[in-house]
Image (tube, rainbow, N blue to C red):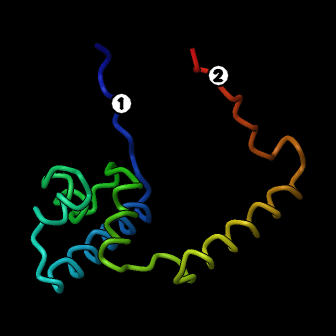
Amino acid sequence: MPATRKTSYARYTLAAAKLLGELIQLERKSRRMTAQELAERLGVARGTVLRLELGDPKVELGIAFEACTILGIHLFEQQDLGGLASRADDVGKQLALLPKYARPTKQATVDDDF
């Protein structure tokens, strides 16, 4: 089994992860919710919530976003789903203006229906 590769993170990344973790912990505690209760809502182990609150950058992005959604923490200037969808559409239009070599490639659709 190959050894795990150690990833180094920029100081900004580590500071942002720590801030996000502290925001999650603050909101969870202000709602009088235990780490176990949040973990159950997220469908993860309590240890994952504690790692998230400590600012571990290896916690999955989806788990962090879901924790923010459950706790009502807004990460972007848009406060609703419509605003986020509109912003995503705008970014998609900007991406379409980039030269072809800079655009992301489309993923091939896999037909796994046997």
Q: What residue is shown at x 16% (from left), y 60% (from top)? A: 50
Up/down of 7 relative to 61, above or below: above
Label 1 sits on a secondary structure element that is: loop
Residue 65, image quadrant:
bottom left
Which quadrant is the C terminus positioned in?
A: top right
Residue found at x 34% / y 36%: 6
Task: Pinpoint residue 34: horizontal percent, then vertical percent.
Answer: 9, 71
Residue at the (86%, 54%) spot, across then down: 98
Tell me the mark number nearer the camera, choosing from 2 and 1: 2
Question: CA–CA distance between discs 2 and 1?
Answer: 33 Å
Q: Residues within 10 Å of mark 1 (few under 14, many from 20)?
A: few
Q: Amino acid at mark 1?
A: Arg
Residue 1 or residue 66, whichever sits in front: 66
Is 7 situated left or right of 26 in this image? right
The image position of residue 69, as x and y in percent, is 38, 71
Q: Residue 22 in the image: x percent, y percent?
A: 25, 74
Disc assigned to residue 51: none
Label 2: element kind: loop
**Label 2, on which residue?**
111
Quarter occupied by the N terminus: top left
Q: Is residue 55 above or below residue 86?
A: above
Toward the viewer: 47 or 38? 38
Looking at this view, is 13 or 31 the one in front? Answer: 31
Report the residue at 20% width, 52% height from top: 48
Q: Quadrant of residue 89?
A: bottom right
Q: What is the quadrant of residue 21 in the picture?
A: bottom left
Q: Which residue is mark 1?
A: 5
> For the view shown, which residue lies furthest in the front direction?
114
Which kind of residue does numbered mark 2 sit on? Asp
| Mark 2 or 1, nearer chain start | 1
x and y, in percent, of residue 49 in the image: 20, 59
Image check: 91 left or right of 54?
A: right
